[in-house]
Amino acid sequence: LKLSKSYTLSLNATWDPYLYELDQNGNPRQVDKLRALNGKGIGKLMNTGTSFSYSLNQDTFKKLFSREKSEEDDTDNSNAMVPDDGTMGENPYETAGRVNSMSQGDNSMGEFDPDGYLKNAVNWNLSFNYSLRYGYGEFDKEKMEYKGRLTHNFGLSGSLQPTKNWNFTFNTDYNFELKKFTNINCSVNRNLHCWSMSASFIPIGPYKSYNFTIRANSTLLQDLKYEQRSSPYDRGANWY
């Protein structure tokens, strides 16, 4: 269920209509007996879960502040007599020509504002995810029923692009049952014009490792590269 552009909620459930008995080894197994015909109700909740996620980015606060600014501008414009756009006293044809030359010139450096200054937009994104799940746990041999078990997890991921050539990403999960972060992945990418650099690493956990690569961007030179990596099975791997 998508409640808004940034907020999503999901819910699911499964019901078990059958009874359980123990086999010759003492392990529970499902038998062809309906709960409804044996006074156990229509069904037992086998598993259910819900999760929701929310995302933030640079446009989230921009829209909030722009809405407040537009209200202030409406108030100021009602009292203003002569607008000042920073070009008073200049030749309007020269000003228009300068701005037009910026907009039609080489955009390889980036995007320019109307005053000719380079815009340094920092793109970022941050996403949260929380899940709560109920399922079967241990089997109660006295009641011949599975006990319920409740688990919940929290996930966090994000990305940061301070310039058009740099990109940082990460994601992590927190397990409330273990009371620790079970997984952290980080990566860095850099566009070097004809070359590209990428690095990724897992700093904690059983899969602790890293990978560093510099390669040519040309499809004809894909074998022209330098790689340095470690494996989670390497003991005492150097991180430099």
Image (cartoon, rainbow, N blue to C red):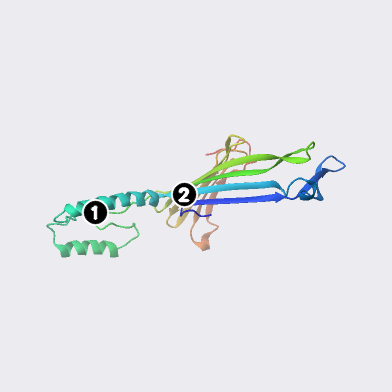
**Gap between marks 1 and 2, in whole Å?**
30 Å
Q: Earlier in the sequence, mark 1 or mark 2?
A: 2
User: Residue 47 at what x, y percent from top left?
Assistant: 67, 47
Identify the residue at image location x=28%, y=63%. Answer: 103
- Which image quarter: residue 204? top right
User: Which residue is at the front of the view, 8 or 32?
Assistant: 32
Identify whether 76 is placed above or below 154.
below
**Residue position marked by numbered label 2 in the rendering:** 55
**Residue position marked by numbered label 1 in the rendering:** 74
Dot 2 falls on a residue whose secondary structure is strand
Residue type at mark 2 is Ser
Is residue 110 left or right of 43 when viewed as pictured? left
Is any part of residue 188 visible from this angle? no
Is any part of residue 156 visible from this angle? yes
Q: Residue furthest right?
A: 24
Q: Residue furthest left?
A: 89
Tell me the crowding category of disc 1: few under 14, some 14 to 19, or many 20 or more residues within 10 angstroms, Cα based: few
Identify the residue at image location x=24%, y=64%. Answer: 100
Dot 1 falls on a residue whose secondary structure is helix
Identify the residue at image location x=43%, y=53%. Answer: 192
Identify whether 70 is placed above or below 147.
below
Residue type at mark 1 is Asp
User: Residue 56 at what x, y percent from top left?
Assistant: 44, 48
Query: Number of labelled discs?
Result: 2
User: Residue 164 at what x, y percent from top left?
Assistant: 40, 54
Is residue 208 left or right of 105 when viewed as pictured? right
- Which of discs 1 and 2 lies nearer the camera? The answer is 1
User: Residue 133 at what x, y percent from top left?
Assistant: 62, 44
Residue 155: give its label: none
User: Which residue is at the front of the view, 53 or 240?
Assistant: 53
Tell me the crowding category of disc 2: few under 14, some 14 to 19, or many 20 or more residues within 10 angstroms, Cα based: some
